[in-house]
Amino acid sequence: MSDADLHLNSLTRDFLARLPAGRVAGKQLYRAPDGGVLGDWFGLALSSAFQPIVDSISGRIAGREAFLRSASPEDQGLSPWTLFSTAADDARVIGLDRLARTVHLLNALVAGNHAPLFLNVHGRLLAAVADDHGRAFRRVVDALGVRPDSIVIETPVEASDQPDLLAFVLRNYRNNGFRVAVNVDSPAQWQSISSTVWPQFVKIDSRKLGRGTEARERLKWLSALREDATLIVTHIEESPEDYVAEHTLLQGYALGHPAAVITELAAEARAA
C-alpha cells in the first residue's frame, strides 16, 4: 500500500490492495508504478487525465472532468475512443464505457480528489442500454464506499437532439443517486429542452457564445433559462473575462490542461 492510499476509506483501500501490480490475463484492472490504476482493454492500457472546472468568479476548483487516455508506449496520449468507438459493436462500447468510468473513479480516489468528478457516457451507450442506466455503476460506487452524489454523469451534445431519450437516461442516473450534466449546442437548444430534462449542470462551448458583448449577452440569456442548473462554459482557451458570471463555471486550456494528477493531489491529501 503506497502513501498515496493512506487517505482512502477502508473499502477502497481493500479493493486497491487486491489489484495486481501489473497486467494479469483475465483481470481488467491493475496498479501502475505511480500508484494509479490502469484498465486492460484487449491489451491496451487505459489511464485517466483530469481537467479542472473552476468557478468563474472565485477561481476555486469546482469539479474535475475525467478523460480516457492510452498508457501504452506505442500510442501514449491517444484517446482510446478513436480506436474503438467507430468500429466496435454496441456491447464493446458499453464495456469500454463502464471500464473507463471505473478507472477514472479509482484514479480520482487515489489522487485524493474531493471535487465533483465529471464522468462522460458515450453517446452509443444511451440508446444501446435498455435497462436501468446507472445501476451497474452504482454497484461499483457502493463497493468503494463513495457517495454517488459526488459524481456527475455527463451526456454528449448529440444526446440533446433526443430530449425524450435524454430525459429517460438522466432520470435513471438521478434515481441511482448521481448528479447529471448535459452538453448543448446552443442557448436555443437548451431553451427547447429545458422543460423536458432536469440536469444539475448545463455545458456549452464558448465558441457558441462568441466574444465580448455578444458573449456576455448570450450568457445572460442562457443564465435566465438555466432554472436551477449551474452553467459550465467549455473550451476557454484564451482570457475567460467574457464569461465571468454568477452560477457559471469555466473549463478549458486557459484554466488547465487535462493531466494525470496522481502525484499532485496525493501530496495535497497528505498535507491536509
Image: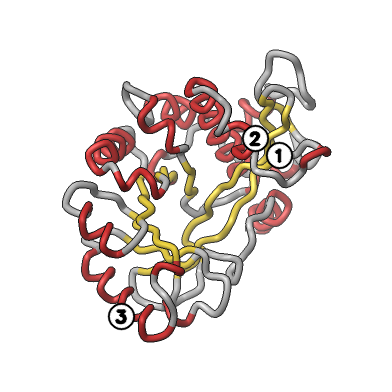
Quadrant of the image containing the N terminus = top right
Side (left or right) of 45 relative to 248: right
Residue at 46 percent across and 75 percent down: it is 58
Tell me the residue that label 3 is attached to: 217
Amino acid tagged 1: Ser
Residue situated in front as seen by the camera: 89 or 92:
89
Cα separation, mark 3 vs mark 2, equals 40 Å
Q: Which mark is residue 28?
A: none
- Does label 2 or label 1 sit earlier along the sequence? 1
Cα separation, mark 2 vs mark 1, equals 10 Å
Above/below status of 232 relative to 122: below
Tell me the residue that label 2 is attached to: 83
Q: Of all residues shown, which one is farthest toward the bottom?
A: 213
Amino acid tagged 3: Glu
Q: Of all residues shown, which one is farthest toward the front?
A: 87
Q: Which mark is residue 70?
A: 1
Q: Nearer the viewer, mark 3 or mark 2?
A: 2
Above/below status of 235 relative to 67: below
- Does label 3 or label 2 sit earlier along the sequence? 2
Residue at 34 percent across and 74 percent down: it is 246
